[in-house]
Amino acid sequence: MAMAFCRNILTKRHGFGSRLLSQPHNCVRFISTVSLTTPRHFSLLPKYTATNSIRGFSASASQEGGDFLYHKHADAALQCIHDKLEGVELDCVEELELREGVLTIDLGSHGTFVLNKHFISKQIWYSSPVSGAQYFNSSSEPRWMSDTLGKDLFTVLSAEMKQACGEAVDFSKCRGA
C-alpha cells in the first residue's frame, strides 16, 4: 500500500514518471530528500518516516524505540535460553537451533519446543509438546508473562522441560535478559 501511495504522490504531485519507481528504494530515497525540503507534500503520511527497512517505511520515532526494545529483550531472552541449554548439555536434547528469532528445541521422541518472536503482537510465541501453544507478553511485569497461565516463560519452560524429558533446567537468570 505504501509503495502505491508513494507512486501516486510522485506521479501526480511531482510529475515524475513511474520509471523513477522501478525499484522500491527509489521511493524511500525520494521521500527522504523531498520530505526535508517540501514536507507539505507528505502531510498524508503523518505516522511514517523514510528508513532503510525492507518495506521502506516504519512507525513513528516513539514506536521505533518500543520496537527496538521489544527486539532487544526478545532476542536476549531467546539467546539466554539457547545458551543455557547449550551449556548444560541435556541428554534429551537432540537438536538445538536459534535462527532469525526462532528457537527450536528438539527432544526427539519427546517432542519439540518452538519459541519465536512475534513482532506484530510484541510477544514470544511458545509451542510445547506438553501444554501446546502459549503467548508471553513483552509489556507485562515481569517481562514475558502469560495471561492465561499467570506464569513467566522461564518458569513454564523449565517445568515443561522437566516433564517432557525428566531433566530440570533453571532459566531464572534469563529473566533479567
Image (cartoon, rainbow, N blue to C red):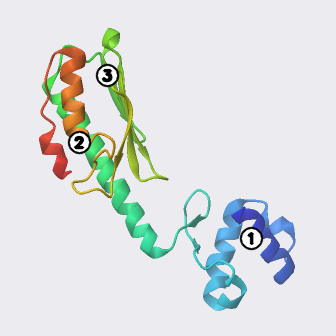
Please say whether residue 14 is visible from this viewpoint: no
Q: Secondary structure at mark 3?
A: loop
Tell me which numbered mark, 1 or 2, is placed earlier along the sequence.
Answer: 1
Quarter of the rendering containing residue 160 = top left
Which quadrant would the N terminus be assigned to in this image? bottom right
Residue 115 in the image: above or below residue 53? above
Residue 135 in the image: above or below residue 97? below
Residue 50 pos. (x, y %): 58, 72
Question: Circle 1: is it few (<14), some (14-19), or many (20+) Cα within 10 Å?
Answer: many
Q: Of 147 and 159, which appears nearest the observer?
A: 147
Residue 96 in the image: above or below residue 6? above
Q: Quick check: 82 left or right of 55?
A: left
Residue 41 pos. (x, y %): 72, 86
Going 34% across and 61% down the picture, which residue do you hit? Answer: 69
Quarter of the rendering containing residue 161 = top left
Q: Quick check: 32 left or right of 19?
A: left
- Identify the residue position indicated by label 1 in the image: 6
Q: Secondary structure at mark 2?
A: loop
- Identify the residue position indicated by label 2 in the image: 151
Which amino acid type is marked by label 2?
Lys
- Identify the residue position indicated by label 3 in the image: 130
Tell me which numbered mark, 2 or 3, is placed earlier along the sequence.
Answer: 3
Mark-to-mark CA distance, 2 and 3: 15 Å
Which amino acid type is marked by label 1?
Cys
Tell me which numbered mark, 3 or 1, is placed earlier along the sequence.
Answer: 1
Which amino acid type is marked by label 3?
Val
How many callouts does the rendering have? Answer: 3
Going 22% across and 15% down the picture, which residue do you hit? Answer: 165
Residue 144 pos. (x, y %): 28, 48
Q: Secondary structure at mark 1?
A: helix
Q: Nearer the viewer, mark 3 or mark 1?
A: 3
Please say whether residue 32 is visible from this viewpoint: yes
